[in-house]
Amino acid sequence: MKIYFVRHGKTQWNLESRYQGSGGDSPLLPQSYTDMKRAGTYLKQFKFEHVFASPIKRARITAERIASEFDRPVPLSLWSRLAEFGLGKWEGQKFDDVKANFPVEFDAFRNHPEKYQAEVVGGESFEDVIQRMTPAIQLIAQRYPSPTQNVLVVSHGAALNTEINALLGTPIAHLRDRGGLANTSTTVLETQDGGQHFTLSDWNNTEYLGSELDETSTI
């Protein structure tokens, strides 16, 4: 079966280069609603059995808007295990301010995840996120084992980047090697053994958006 992972639409804090974890949630930008419609028009061809999403508003709305473009009603479930990183003291702060005030952890979070000390920030570690998300993804794979069944998961940039790479067996030190995930992008994983092993079919696909992305669109 295949799982299609979509990052939520772009928000005001994304545009302002602010950290936006599980404790922060700024409004989606007007352009994001167009992007969600385009994503739904593209994704409806895959005829999903179910949509799972983070309950955080920006992800929930993205999931609802995408699913509204499908040719038939598809069940939507909100799972807290699919939420974004807990970022503690960083929530709502601009990247430049975090870099100035937490230079070591800022660099580790972006470039050396194996060295990131989450307790300094008061948030979740990469290991924490993997440990809460992996059982959820494996359960989804077990519920929909048929090769003809597709499932959509709508979540967040940092959490998805971490979890998708972990499912592919990527060591934590190399989680960033494939690059980031853009807003409203699609990444596809396939499993043939109920979620024990995954292969990558598509990474950070944004071709259907038809618009130029800038550095604030990718994390």
Image (tube, rainbow, N blue to C red):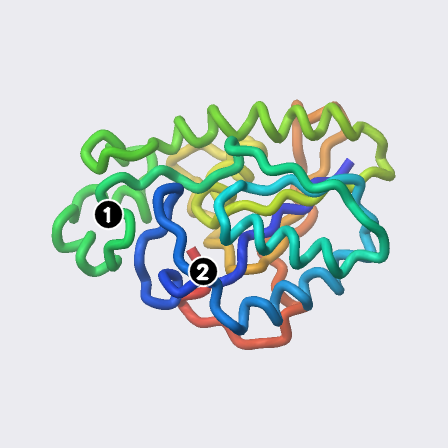
Q: Which residue is mark 2?
A: 218
SS class, disc 1:
helix
Q: Are marks 1 and 2 in contact (CB under 8 Å)?
A: no
Residue type, mark 2 in image: Thr
Q: Classify residue 114 by image quadrant.
A: top left
| Label 1 to label 2: alpha-carbon separation | 16 Å
Mark 1, other Cα within 10 Å: few <14 / some 14–19 / many ≥20: many
Please name whichever residue, 3 or 113, is drawn nearer the observer in this view of the structure. 3
Q: Classify residue 173 by image quadrant.
A: top left
- Residue visible at 48% across and 45% down? 56
- Residue visible at 39% across and 65% down? 12
Across and down, in percent, residue 149 comes to 82, 38
- Residue visible at 35% across and 37% down? 86
Q: Indicate the quadrant containing the N terminus: top left, top right, bottom left or bottom right.
A: top right
| Farthest bottom residue in view | 211
Across and down, in percent, residue 200 comes to 65, 43
Please name whichever residue, 92 or 94, is drawn nearer the observer in this view of the structure. 92
Is residue 183 found left or right of 100 in the rendered image? right
- Residue visible at 16% across and 46% down? 102
Q: Which residue is mark 1?
A: 106
Across and down, in percent, residue 108 comes to 27, 42
Q: Is residue 34 above or below residue 116?
A: below
Q: Which mark is residue 39?
A: none
SS class, disc 2:
loop
Mark 2, other Cα within 10 Å: few <14 / some 14–19 / many ≥20: some
Across and down, in percent, residue 68 comes to 73, 57
Q: Classify residue 42 by image quadrant.
A: bottom right
Residue type, mark 1 in image: Phe
Q: Indicate the quadrant containing the C terminus: top left, top right, bottom left or bottom right.
A: bottom left
Q: Which numbered disc flags the more N-terminal residue, 1 or 2?
A: 1
| Farthest left residue in view | 101
Q: Is residue 153 above or below residue 191?
A: below
